[in-house]
Every structure is written in structure tokens, then in C-alpha cells.
Amino acid sequence: MQLTRASLETDRNDFLAAGYRLPDFDFDRIRANTLKNPVWIHFGTGNIFRAFQANIMQRLLNQGAVETGLIAAEGYDYEIIEKSIRPHDGLTVLATLKADGTVEKTVVGSIAEALILDSANKTDFSRLKEIFASPSLQLASFTITEKGYALSDARGRLFSDVEADFDKGPDCPGSYMGKVVSLLYHRFQNGGLPIAMVSMDNCSHNGDKLKAAVHAFADAWCERGLAEPGFCRYVKDAARVAFPWTMIDKITPRPDPKVEAILDSDGFEGLNPVITSKNTFIAPFVNAEECEYLVIEDAFPNGRPPLEKGGVIFTDRETVDKIEKMKVCTCLNPLHTALAVFGCLLGYRLISEEMKDPTLRKLIELIGYREGLPAAVDPGILDPKAFIDQVVNVRLPNPFMPDTPQRIASDTSQKLPIRFGETIKTYLRDPSLDVKDLKMIPLVFAGWLRYLMAVDDQGGRFEPSPDPLLEEAGAYVKDLELNSAPKDLSVLDGLLRNEKIFGVDLAAVGMDESVKKYFAEMSYGKGAVRETLEKYVK
């Protein structure tokens, strides 16, 4: 069996006998409809897109609920299109890794067209302009990571390609956002047609991040006389160009060799992963957990496909915000970060293996149920406790999910203020809650300080995950060693008062001494992290 249209036809019985769910629609008719009347284009063709959005569209196609497929566009790593999507006729194998140990295998075929977002690629860019000029186009969605919307560095300096695009105008842009806004400008020039620009990236208020980038380009071009003045009015008119907020949640790790082995044993050929020149690890298959949430603010000025039939939840902006805060601040992300920090210290290589550790499992239960749940935002359409139940009992223990604490530990300094600091702030605001009752959150903070030493619980060195503040924060502990002698931990005071890292001044809220105490105990010697956890968790 091969992952091609031809093989799907000639080897269909083999696919079915091996347990694969197959596309159940007329490819040629759907492709012809899509080319003539495009409805949905998606930018960013990584694993999450092929495992989630593409599969949602396949459900709609199989139901007969829509008559057009997806258009996939890649603006960062063109080799994803050239080496993974086009050679397989837009098909992807989705391996859904279930908590009961079974694997659901689906051939996803909803991508009707795959294009490279490169203004120097005249053929593809002309086609993209044609798509954006089409009255039928209802939405352009994005999974390009939060960094994809950034136009400047941490010091506020414009990236060189963005600065060049500001000065050159929309004709031949080189930056990602410049290319996107150039297409939007072409839509404006062809009647000012309405459209929804929908960020589906896993970041807070994602629609505003996309909107800010689009508006910045429009302002720059209009101010320089490089675009018609009406373009600024167009992109800032929510009745014509909307930027809905969304909340997305689905764990989709990099393609796993164990999944590749399963597909090989089924008789698949040619599914080998590829590492591109930009170091993207891609494969014709993706693996993902079964749980998934996509909640979208229902703001679509040109209409939208019936995505609710594929499992999408539509609601208002306020509710999207509540669900995002529920997930990120209390019910999932804080648990993930706690496991990441202590998993690295205790030598674990899989999140699912950590969930077999009674102490670590108890730790995240206390963080979620005892400390987080009283501060959780209740969005009304999803129950916070039920969400935590699923995280603790189904998602994190899933033995088939090859997610690692090392991956989750990336950028921890950027995550702490949201994943824990917001809960502390809620406790400070709510007279019915007492910040002194928070015991596990300062334990995690102490664990992160211990992690910054880059020495595991057995005294071995390890390489901390990438983090923009790793060097700055690590400087506070660089002279500390594992030993049994008392330490003067006043050296930590500057770090513990850093509101950008912890969300609050830990000294001002009376939590700094607890963090120091826990940290001192974890630094007592080999095995001290384990002993400290067991002492306070149990």
C-alpha cells in the first residue's frame, strides 16, 4: 500500500482489511469544486493542521455537509509541501492514539490543493491571489505558532524582512505576515470582499495577535502611499474583516517511530520521515491524542462552513476567553508544566510514564483539584472539573502518547506567570480564598529553581530545554551546589520578585519564603527532590 490516490483505488480492500478509515467522497468532484469556488484556506501545514483541522473537514466531506475541500498553504518551510504533501496527493495518515491502547488509523484526504506561500513563486502566488479574489472564500485560518505573528524582536526592533516589506509595499513581500497581508490587499482591490481571518494557534487572544500584525502592515503601507487609503478602513471594519478568537487543544507530538512501525507492519510503503533544510521533522503520517477541542468566536462576515458538524464549538468572544483561561490557567497547562519540571529532574522521558508515579500523579491532582479548581473560570459550556478529570484520567496517562517532559519544559519562564500566576492573583482578589492555602504552586516554583541548576536528582548534569530567560534566571543558582550545608538563599530574592516570570512579586504576596524552603530541601543532595515531593505531596 502507498499513500497516493491511485493506491487508495487499487488497494482499497487492503486498506480496509488493515483497519483504515478512508475518505468517502468523490475526490475529483470535490477538487473541481474547490478550484472553482474556494471556501477555506489554511496557512501552516504542520502536524496539528493535518491531525485536526484537515480531519474536521474530512468528517464534513464524508457527511456530505460541504462540497469543497481545504486549501493548504505553507509560508515558512516550503519543503513540507514539496516533500510531504504533494508527493502523496495531499493525503495524510492520522494515527489516533487512544488511552485504551488502541490505534485508530485514518487516511485524511480533505486537502484539495496545496500551495507555497512565496511571492517569488509566481505560479503558486498567482493562484493564491486568485483564491483571495474569490467571493466564495469565507475564511483563512492559521496554525503558524505565536511567533509567526511577531513583527519585532524582544526589544521592539522590527525584523529585517518586515522592515523591508513596510518600505517595499505589497507587490513582492518576503515576510510571512507581509505575504498574507498582500493577499488580503488583493482581496480589497477586488471589491473589498468580506472574510474571517482565524488564528487557531494555541496562544491567548490569538485573533488579536493576527489582527495587530495585519493592521501594522496596512498602516505602514497606507502611510507610505504604497496602498490605497481605503485598505486601512477595510481591514479595521469588523463587518468586512473579522479576527475571531479561538481556543484549540489537542496534543500532537512529532511523528513517532513506534507509529511508523505499526504502519510498516500494515504494508505501507514510503512513509519515512524527512528532515527539511529548516530542520522541520515531517512525515506523511501524524500521531495525536483522541481528545480535541476547537472553540471559535462566531464572527464570520462572509458566512462559514458548518464546522460544528465536525465537532467545533461556536460561541461568543467572552466564552472563548473563559475556556482559554480555564485550560491554560488551571485545568491543563499548569499540570503539564509541573510534570515537565519534575520529569526532567527525576529522569523521566515520557509524560505518560510520570503518570504511573503515585507522587507525581498526586501532585498534579492537588494542583488541579485542590488549588486550581477554586480559582477556575467556569465558561458554562465546558465543566472545569470534568475537563480536569479527562486530563488526569485519560489524556496525560495515555501510554501511546510520545510526549516528553523535555519538550513541555521549553520556555517555562514564559509559561509560569500565566499557568500559576493567574491563580495566585485570583486567590488575592477573592475574599473567600486564602493565598496561604497554596502549597503545591510554590513547590513547583521551587522545582523550577532546582531545574535551573541543570543537575538531576541523582547529581547528573542535563541540558535544560530552550528558554529565552534560561541564562538570566540560571545566573541566580549558578553558584549553588548540591550539599548538606545551610545556604544563604537571599541570592534568589531578585528572581523571586520578578513579576514577569511568576506573574506576581512572590515576596509581596508572602510566598518567597516557602519557595526558598522547598528549594533548600530539594537541593540538600542526591535524592532530595524525590524526598521533598513525597514529604509535601503525601
Image (cartoon, helix red, strand yellow):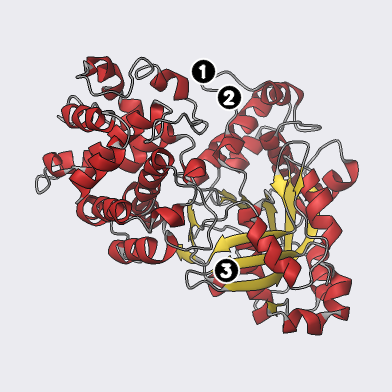
**Which one is nearer the viewer's eye here, 45 or 336?**
336
Q: CA distance from mark 1 to mark 2?
A: 8 Å
Name the secondary structure under disc 2.
loop
Residue that badge 2 annotates: 152
**Which one is nearer the viewer's eye here, 363 or 142?**
363
**Badge 3 amino acid:** Leu
Q: CA distance from mark 3 to mark 2?
A: 34 Å
Name the secondary structure under disc 1.
loop
Q: Earlier in the sequence, mark 3 or mark 2?
A: 2
**Which one is nearer the viewer's eye here, 469 or 316?**
469
Badge 2: how crowded within 10 Å, few (<14), some, or many (20+)?
A: some
User: Disc 3 vs disc 2: Cβ atoms closer than 8 Å?
Assistant: no
Residue depicted at 80% across the width and 44% down the height: 79
How far across and how far down the image is residue 364, in percent?
Answer: 30, 52
**Badge 2 amino acid:** Ser
Q: Quadrant of residue 19?
A: bottom right
Residue depicted at 32% across the width and 67% down the height: 386
Left or right, residue 47 beside residue 376: right
Residue depicted at 16% across the width and 38% down the height: 428
How far across and how far down the image is residue 130, in percent?
Answer: 82, 51
**Badge 1 amino acid:** Arg
Residue that badge 1 annotates: 155
Residue depicted at 56% across the width and 23% down the height: 153
Badge 1: how crowded within 10 Å, few (<14), some, or many (20+)?
A: few
How far across and how far down the image is residue 418, in percent?
Answer: 35, 39
Q: Quadrant of residue 42?
A: bottom right
User: Disc 1 vs disc 2: Cβ atoms closer than 8 Å?
Assistant: yes
Give the answer, above or below, for where 445 lies relative to 52.
above
How far across and how far down the image is residue 208, in percent?
Answer: 49, 41
Residue that badge 3 annotates: 307
